[in-house]
Amino acid sequence: MFIIKMHKVLMPMQPLKRINHLWIGSGMLLDFKHNSRFYSSKTATVSSIPDFGDHVEIFRHHSIRELSRAVLVLHLCGVETLVTNSYKLLKVGERILGQRGLAVVTSPLYRQFVAGNSGEELRRACARLEPRAIRLMIAPMLETDVGEKNETQMFSTNLMRMVKFLGMTAADGSIAAAPGSSPPAPAVCQAKVTGHISADIMEKVSKPYSAMDMDERLKAVQWTVDVMTTLDTDMNLKKESHGNDTCDILNPKGSTISEICSSENSPLSGLLMSWKGSECDALAKASPFSDVLNSEEMNEFLCGLRRFSLFGMLAEDLGIAMAVDAEFTYVNPCINLVSVALMVRNNKLKPVIWNTYQGYLTESRQWLEEDAQLAERLGCCFGVKLVRGAYMDHERLLAKQNGQLDPVQPTYDATNRNYDGIAEEQIMAVHKNPDRRLILLASHNEDTVKKALGKLSSLPNLPPTHGHHLCFAQIYGMGDNITMPLASSGALVYKSVPLGTVSEVLPYLARRASENRSVLQGARREKQLLMRALRDRMMMSSRAA
C-alpha cells in the first residue's frame, strides 16, 4: 500500500506546504515533519586543498573485511574482459545458479556498490557515512531506450517505485549535520526521464526542440509548465478556506499497486491511463510538438509530464532535491525541456530540481548555457549536476552508423578541458548568485577536484550559502580516496547509490560498468591506497595478537 497525504494549496504555482506523512510499503508510515536533520544553520568552508594520498585517514573507518572486499572488487572491475562481458556473465550465471545462487556468488559486488533494498538498509548506510558528514544520492534503476516495448503497467509501477524512492530519500537518506563543519543541504534522489516517458516519444520531441531558437524554446517550456500545472487541479491540491485539510493522492484502502494503477476510480487514473477532456485536447492542439506526435503519442507524453510534475512537487514538499539524469544524445533535449519546466514549477525559492550535463559531449556547454538563460528569463533557480558521461562507445557507434558527426569530445584530455571549463564557469555563477545557482561536480578525477577547490579558495568574500550550493559526488563503493578527504576538509559530498534487489541491481551495474570502463580502470590510485591501508591494518592486527 502506498499512500501520500498532501496539504492542499491555494494556487497551482505556489510552493506546496510540506508533506507530513507518506505511506510506503506494507503499512509503513513515515513522518516527514520538517526538522533540522535536513537543513543545518551552519555552513562549511574549505580552507585548503586536502591530502588525497593519506591512506590512514581516508580509510580509518573501514574494517579489514571492508578493505579486503574493496581491493577484490576494484581489482575485478579493472579486468577489461570481465567488465565488457559482465552483463552476459550475469545472465548465464542466473540461468545456471538461479537467483539465490547468483546472489551468493555476487554478494561482494552487491555489498560494495549497493546500499540495500529497504529503508532500514538505507539508514544503516547513512549511519556508516554520518561520522564523515557524507550524504547519499539514491539512484533509481528505472530507464528505457528507443525501440523497447513500453506498457502502461510498466510506467505505473515505475511511478509507484519513484514515489517510494522519494519518500525513502526524505526519511532515511538525510544525516545529522556535523557540528561546525557540515553545510545545510538536502538529501538527493536522482531520476531518469526515460523510466516514465517512452524513449521513442522523447526522441521525436528532442529533434524539433533542439532545432528551436531561444524564443521558441521559451514557449515550449511554458507549454510544458502548463501541462504540468493541470495536475494541481486534477489532484485537488487547492487550499480550502479553513486551511489545513489533507487529501489522499493514492488509494487509502490497502489496494495492490496493480489495483491502484488500473482502477477507474483511482485518483491516479488521470496520471497513468489516457488523460481525456477539453483541457487535454486544448493543450494537445497547442503543443509545439503536434507535428511529430500522433494523438496517442501526444496523450502518452502529456501523462508522462504530469507524472514528473508529481515527482517535482513531492521533492519540494519533502525538503529534498531531485537530480534529473542525462542519458543518450537523442533524448537529452527532451530531458532538458522537462528539467527546465520542473525548475519553473519547483525552483522558485531554491534549486530543488537539478539537471545533468555531460562533459564528454561537444555541445554540453552550449546546452547548459542556453538552459541557464531560459531559467533566468523564467525567474527560477538553476541547479546543475556535471558529469563526464557514461555512453561514449554507444554514442560514437550510433553516429558512425547514421553518418553523423561524432558528438563526443575527440580525446580524454579534451573531455577534461571541457569539464573543467564548465566547472569553473559554474563555480563563478554560484559565487555571483549563491542563493539561486547550484553546481554538483560528479567526478572521480583528482585533478578536477583540486582545480575546483583551488578556484573556490581564490574567490574573495565567499557568501554564507556557498557551501551547500557547490558540492561533489562519487559512486558509492568507489572513489573514497576523493570522497573522504573532501568531506574532512568541510566540502559537501554525496555518494550516488542504487537501491534494489540483486536481480534488479546487478544487471544495471553491469551496464554502467561497461559504460564507465575509464572510471573503473582509472581506480589504480584508490587500489594502491586500499592495499596500503589493508597492509597496515593487518600488521597492526598481528602485533596486537
Image (cartoon, rainbow, N blue to C red):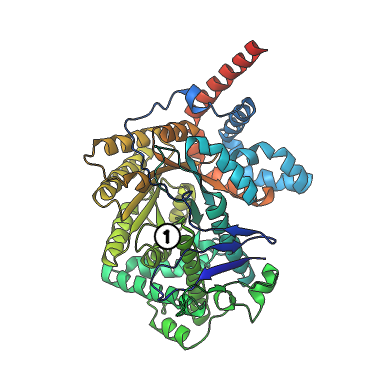
Look at the image and tell me whether residue 149 can be seen. no
**As drawn, 2 above or below 452:** below
Look at the image and tell me whether residue 266 can be seen. yes
**As drawn, 486 above or below 56:** below
User: Is residue 85 found left or right of 333 in the rendered image?
Assistant: right
Mark 1 burial class by Cα count in 10 Å: few <14, some 14-19, many 20+: many
Please give the residue where the numbered disc 1 appears in the rendered image.
332
**As drawn, 486 above or below 272:** above
Q: Nearer the viewer, residue 434 or 55?
A: 434
- Where in the figure is residue 127, as x and y percent of width and height? 57, 40
- Image quadrant for the N terminus? bottom right
Q: Residue furthest bottom?
A: 278
Counting labels gives 1
Quadrant of residue 82 within the rendered picture = top right
Task: Name the residue at 43% across, 70% down.
Answer: 205
- Where in the figure is residue 269, as x and y percent of width and height? 59, 78
Quadrant of residue 477 within the rendered picture = top right
- Image quadrant for the C terminus? top right
Q: Residue furthest top?
A: 543
Residue type, numbered disc 1: Asn
- Where in the figure is residue 507, as x and y percent of width and height? 63, 49
Task: Name the residue at 26% across, 52% down.
Answer: 433
Q: Residue furthest left?
A: 460
User: Is residue 438 found left or right of 320 in the rendered image?
Assistant: left
Secondary structure found at label 1: helix
